[in-house]
Image (cartoon, coloured by chain):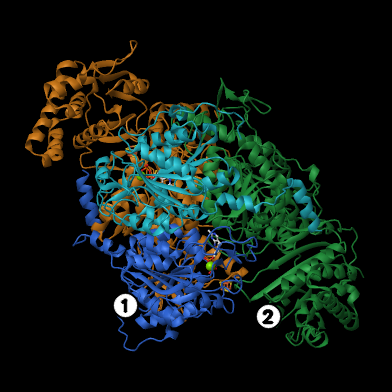
Chain colours: A blue, B cyan, C orange, D green
Amino acid sequence: MSSVVTVEKRKVNDYKGDERPTWCPGCGDFGVLNAVFKALSDHNFDPKNVIIVSGIGCSSRLPFFTDAYGFHTVHGRAMPVAAGIRAVQPDMPVLAMGGDGDAFAIGVGHLIHAIRRNLNICYVVMDNAVYGLTKGQTSPTAERGLATKATPQGASDPAVNPLLLALATGCTFVARGFSSKPKELADLIARGIAHEGFAFIDTYSPCPTFNTVNTFKYYRDATDDLPADFDPTDFNAALQYAASEDPLYLGLYYQAEQPTFEDHIRNNKPEVTNSAMTVVEDLFDQMS
Amino acid sequence: MSSVVTVEKRKVNDYKGDERPTWCPGCGDFGVLNAVFKALSDHNFDPKNVIIVSGIGCSSRLPFFTDAYGFHTVHGRAMPVAAGIRAVQPDMPVLAMGGDGDAFAIGVGHLIHAIRRNLNICYVVMDNAVYGLTKGQTSPTAERGLATKATPQGASDPAVNPLLLALATGCTFVARGFSSKPKELADLIARGIAHEGFAFIDTYSPCPTFNTVNTFKYYRDATDDLPADFDPTDFNAALQYAASEDPLYLGLYYQAEQPTFEDHIRNNKPEVTNSAMTVVEDLFDQMS
Amino acid sequence: MTRNDLVIRVAGEAGEGIVSTGQLLTQAALRGGFHVLTYSQPPSEIKGGHAFYQIRLSADRSYSKGDSVDILLAFNQEAYDRNAAETKDDGLLVYDPSEVTPSADSHFVQVEFPLNDIAKNQLKFPIAKNVVAVGALAELFDLPTKHLDSLIEERWLRKGEAVVQKNLDALRAGIDYVIEHVPQRDRFALYPEKSHAGEIVVSGSEAIGLGAIAAGCSFMAGYPITPASDIKEFLEIHLPKTGGHALQAEDELAAIGMVLGASYAGSKAMTATSGPGFSLMIEMLGLAAMAELPCVIVDAQRAGPSTGMPTRHEQGDLYQAAFAGHGECPRIVLAPTSVRDCFYQTVNAFNLAEKYQTPVVLLGDTLLNVRSESVPRPILNEVKVVDRLLFSENGNGVGNEVGRMNGEYNRYVLTENGVSPMSIPGQEGGQYIATGLEHNEEGLHRYDEATHTIMTQKRFRKLERAAHEAPEGDRFGDPEAEIGILTWGSTVGSVIEVIRQAEQEGLKLDMLAPRMLMPLPDHEIRPFVESKRVIIIPEVNYVGQFANMITSQYPRDYVRINIFGGMPFRVDWLLEKIREEVAQYV
Amino acid sequence: MTRNDLVIRVAGEAGEGIVSTGQLLTQAALRGGFHVLTYSQPPSEIKGGHAFYQIRLSADRSYSKGDSVDILLAFNQEAYDRNAAETKDDGLLVYDPSEVTPSADSHFVQVEFPLNDIAKNQLKFPIAKNVVAVGALAELFDLPTKHLDSLIEERWLRKGEAVVQKNLDALRAGIDYVIEHVPQRDRFALYPEKSHAGEIVVSGSEAIGLGAIAAGCSFMAGYPITPASDIKEFLEIHLPKTGGHALQAEDELAAIGMVLGASYAGSKAMTATSGPGFSLMIEMLGLAAMAELPCVIVDAQRAGPSTGMPTRHEQGDLYQAAFAGHGECPRIVLAPTSVRDCFYQTVNAFNLAEKYQTPVVLLGDTLLNVRSESVPRPILNEVKVVDRLLFSENGNGVGNEVGRMNGEYNRYVLTENGVSPMSIPGQEGGQYIATGLEHNEEGLHRYDEATHTIMTQKRFRKLERAAHEAPEGDRFGDPEAEIGILTWGSTVGSVIEVIRQAEQEGLKLDMLAPRMLMPLPDHEIRPFVESKRVIIIPEVNYVGQFANMITSQYPRDYVRINIFGGMPFRVDWLLEKIREEVAQYV
Ligand SMILES: Cc1ncc(C[n+]2csc(CCOP(=O)(O)OP(=O)(O)O)c2C)c(N)n1
Ligand SMILES: Cc1ncc(C[n+]2csc(CCOP(=O)(O)OP(=O)(O)O)c2C)c(N)n1
Ligand code: SF4
Ligand code: SF4
Ligand SMILES: [Mg+2]
Ligand SMILES: [Mg+2]
């Protein structure tokens, strides 16, 4: 879209918005935001050519704190909005950001279809096992029994495993990040953006305000990097590592090449397209 | 609920409703209906103690053709309705029936959460890779490229794999049936009903009217029974067989024991419950 | 004796070629210069069951399906039993005696027509039964055979000369049989006065699809639902030709979500659905209103509530279109009044959506969307297309002195008409966050009293302006008449015919059907309401949704006429009812 | 000088103990016999940011939050800056000089209060700052200390005697400081005239939860959303005590789906949400209407459209509650007019849902749901609970001569009032299919004209009956007054205070607030509308949703007063506005 040629490489600060983040002090989302800045600057994107889509939740406020184009949609619907954007702007990088409630409760149906379509976006789920914005109810990634202020009786159901879910539905880039490993996370996001197809990065991003169990420390103790020799083209290995509960592995589990949503749209168009009015006149002819 | 003691075993005909099925001649759903009758009679349930829940679609009309209680809900929402029923009638067998569009397009988010909760129902998806009732658009189980009258350009996205999806989200009973193997299907359904937890049975049920590719013959050629020595407690084997595209295996892939939705509800109640008014008076006391 | 209006109904088992028979006749009649208007009733059963396809042929333009049937072609006994009552006493019944036994006291002119026998034994070509029937019917109303010949050629050419010839023979067999066996057939002959030959035959759904393309729509997402799926399927095939794209989403929530994404990204975008799907879109209708994103939602109404009667007609979604959405949620609602109007109102819907950056709901219905009609071919270079107002990087919105304030782009800058220039991703300096939260001019979320007050006013100011630019309402009848009929949508067809007939009988009536129903165009409605002694509001719903809306803005007494059986108004019934009502006021 | 009405606002950084300070004072005041009514504004930010908690204490019952503040306790500079304007010129400002510097031209009585210093240096117990403040405020309005002492004991007993003592010391420190440093403090002293000591302090959300339990609700499914989550959380904890169950669904579509399943299975079931979630429930609202399943949907309104301003107030969902849903979709809408009324209207909602087998929408709002108030303790054995009409196996519905026709159970048998006996799974012979399709008496889907006509009438007949049994509207003022105020929901609070004040100034006003808004109870509204010379309709929304509904049924002129800034009506402003409007009519 843009004709401006950038010579100098952009810095992290070039992606910062005017609005200061409204998150609680200590929120994991700060780290994710910084990783996003870093990943964008790694790609040296012009902010005006980046679109960040989100749902509703603390984490979904992220677009407001950047200088990119953004769409803060409604709860659970970031995926279809992103698909609509990509359908008409297939060359503009689209990041989707949001919470675990947004992605795995109200939004999980759309997530599956976005994955199935291999929509070429990078989706970072900021996973804190709770609904932060509505004051701390447990979310689908909460372990059974997790008790919070708003769910004192404890989560009633077992947690979903987002990685298995993504793998089972054909996701072509599956990763897990951690807010307190900003460099690695930035790297995953940068690679997710570079990936041709749906890049899914489930990211631990603790909510110190409402989740006193799954803290930074908790995740630091519970996680481990995927082995250095791990082969992210091995689907079965990915399934197995994704199923592990102890440790929880960080890194890129799986990557594959498949036709994308955008490929389909491109291929669906005739070589030569016509003006709207020509097409309509032709159809009139056929109807008379 | 019922105090009638049945001595004689009920026959298949005892479950038939007054309404004759409105399906097209040759529709796969007839076979599934018969298998349901057979499974219910195997259990010798009194029809008044059975509830069949469905969504919207040709297949979802099934409850009308039985003599059970039934709820023909709206498109995609059979799962939450079934959960509501089970929450208040945890001892009454609930079958859910519906199509692939209902289950995997509009309804897939609810499916995942019903599975996660391990809702104790048996869900038979009558899978024909198309939307029958709306005249033959391709559904999420259509192979990429499948062309139908209403989707002449061919399905644009790869098919979902319902079995992998169910396995990845923690389903405790995962099976695949075929309408033209009524005995085996009836057996799977009977076992699904007996299973304590969410029993998911994806069932090939061809639509000769709108899907001229995935016919009875097609499935007969493409399917094979799971090996006789297959171990349905082996999760990894289940994943592998579920991923197979040639052949497509029929039978029970996986079964496990896990606490159910109903267990949770039962455990959540105090030993001794009180009348509503007593509870309210107590709360008033605390509030003064 | 000549006639200029004839209703033919072909009835039988669904899937037996009812529709193809009807379509062949329709196109032949069009080429013969007739006006054609079709009406069909799909079966309730999934396949099989009873179905019919009805064609009204007329010299003058007709506006409704016709109250009763002149010629009934009954393929089987059920078809006869179900449709005999709607056939005129002096109508013609054509039937195959091997399938149908008419009742003993039938008043019809009856023509036994051994269709099966001719096709099977004479032609040795059983599936040609329908073509034989087409030949027979064409001969009955004296349609020049050349049109049929050429249609058959066009249709079967791909299958080879031999097939064409077999079908031409079948056609001839039907014609010959009629010539031989129906002596008084000139009573059914039709003579076109005006030629409608240059017209096109379209369904309402197709007209909407064409209108969308003409208006510059480049993205459509939908989900199958009766009676709106056709729009999606039409656009899936034809939109790519312009470089656009249409697709089937996983549900209606996704469809509208994609539409809003596409709109944000700079496209003119739409979705099409019916009641149940529309209900699922309500949350995001609000998002569109709040984020001020242009979009068009077609709601092809069907009988409700809930799943209701998917193949039946009702004007039951007006409330939903006008009032659904939590909070104060501005939107525009348009209702085309005919198949032809579906084209023009779709163009208007896109124009208004873009101009006022607001969701526009276009209310079709089973009657309009499903029926085919011959309509004058729209003259495309008279079609005005409105494009998005974009802020320009050197400080101004296009043709507008606003949009960039002190060097900053403010997406929601306050303007006199409430419209603020948009930007499109990629546009330098145009970055903003579209959000459903209340926000200030910059688009940043703010919760203070002043912001919410001012921004609410801004959003509604747009609507107030839009009302002034409402597409002109549909008028028919005598402007001086003391008795007015206020109506909307597809009911207009029946009302026009009522007015015509009433006029012949000396009763003067005047109709106004606003095409914009939300906001109501005051400049049209007020003078009408204030100038009529009696105002009658007929609509196909129970509570009188339009009547209530009109009353709340123009308090006075109105006579309400409501039916709600899943069918449109019969002209004779409605005229009689109006007579009764009017009598009370004399 | 004695006073009987005092507004205290505690303001500071969210999370700094604002709420607990407020709650402690509230309960102490209640025990001291005062009426209390609280109002709080959560911050827009997720954590931190400015927040306040306001308590109105009065001898007589008060009905609104109070227009301005008598005593402002400002914990920090932002709290002072933001709230000074709302504090009366002769009000009292209490602040910590280490945190706050009042402006030079402040008119307030100012009390420097070294809170931090006392807590940190004198008491060596920094977190006791709030308790010190409570002591100070209590002393200011002369609250008997015994209530505070016992509350502090109850609160900290679990933490041991030592902690209790430390807090008691803190309390005492606050009291002593005031005694020493505030000489004219009797001007803030309050003397309860009527004792409200037997009352309970509840929020609207709690009152709804209590009402649900009392009405026999045994199932609740919800999804978190401001300001409705509290209802779910209350019922999750307390419903199991009666053997019922409440749960968090995966979204609102699931929540309402579960509710309908539970209802079908025989339970009284409900959900609670706010606008965005309510919008997602619209499709299944129609299913409930069509399948005639009792259910209660609480919509705690907040400012919209879309995500809007989640923590702000608006009466913007009336249209949605009354009109959303495709097709003709009957439902009942109730609107409680006070926190106390939340309890009773919830009971009524369940009763009406069961009696008329229809969805009932209960409209709360941010103001009602969030605020706590002391209300008379409901007398439970006066609460009437209606249970479901079940068909009985020996041929009749309970107390009803219908339900089984010729030995067959017909779920939707036609009856005079439209209500047909239900069955519950497990009931012998009661099998039927609940469906959203149009259906005959047996429940089998049918698409013919007669069925749809008759069944539509049946469904609406129920509503017509229900209107006659509407809970009595809220009345206040002089029944003879020529000027009437028609209003609804929480605006009643402000209106009652307006009427009281107007009366003192010689202006007579009369208020009617129907509690049933759909259908409108004609027997209440018509006489009111016909007997008043001027009728004013104040409501917190832009278009005048209630005013439009009233006009469409009772055409005449109404004076509309609308605000839409996310805040409720100020009493003084509304009175002034009414004065202006009335002046035009004299
Ligand atoms: C339709 C709808 N339902 C509910 C809500 C209320 N809501 C806002 S954010 C949220 C969940 C947030 O959780 P998550 O997505 O995990 O984000 P987090 O705040 O934890 O970052 C909910 C339920 C809403 N805005 N819209
Ligand atoms: C909300 C909503 N959207 C769309 C429809 C239209 N519709 C009815 S059935 C159906 C799909 C049926 O497909 P499937 O579930 O596979 O069932 P089948 O007919 O193939 O058995 C659709 C889209 C509807 N009834 N409701
Ligand atoms: S509530 Fe939790 S998730 Fe939300 S901003 Fe605060 S710490 Fe972060
Ligand atoms: S359309 Fe297909 S799925 Fe539906 S009844 Fe006919 S054959 Fe069966
Ligand atoms: Mg979260
Ligand atoms: Mg299907």
- B109 over C581 or under it: above or below: below
Whether pointer 2 and pointer 1 mark residues with C-beta atoms closer than 8 Å, the reply is: no
Q: Position of residue C193 (x, y in %)?
A: 23, 32
Tell which residue pokes out farthest to the front in this image: B229
**C582, above or below D109, in the image:** above
Q: Which residue is mark 1?
A: A2
Quadrant that contains the C terminus of chain C: top right
Residue at mark 2 shares a chain with residue at mark 1 = no
Q: Quadrant of the N terminus of chain C?
A: top left
Can the viewer see residue C44? yes
Regarding mark 1 in the picture, which secondary structure is present there?
Answer: loop
Amino acid residing under circle 2: Glu
Q: Nearer the viewer, residue D428 or C32?
A: D428
Q: Can you tell which quarter of the image residue D492 is in?
A: bottom right
Residue drawn at point x = 83 percent, y = 70 percent: D152
Quadrant in the rendering for residue B29: top left
Instruction: Give the labeled residue for mark 2.
Output: D78
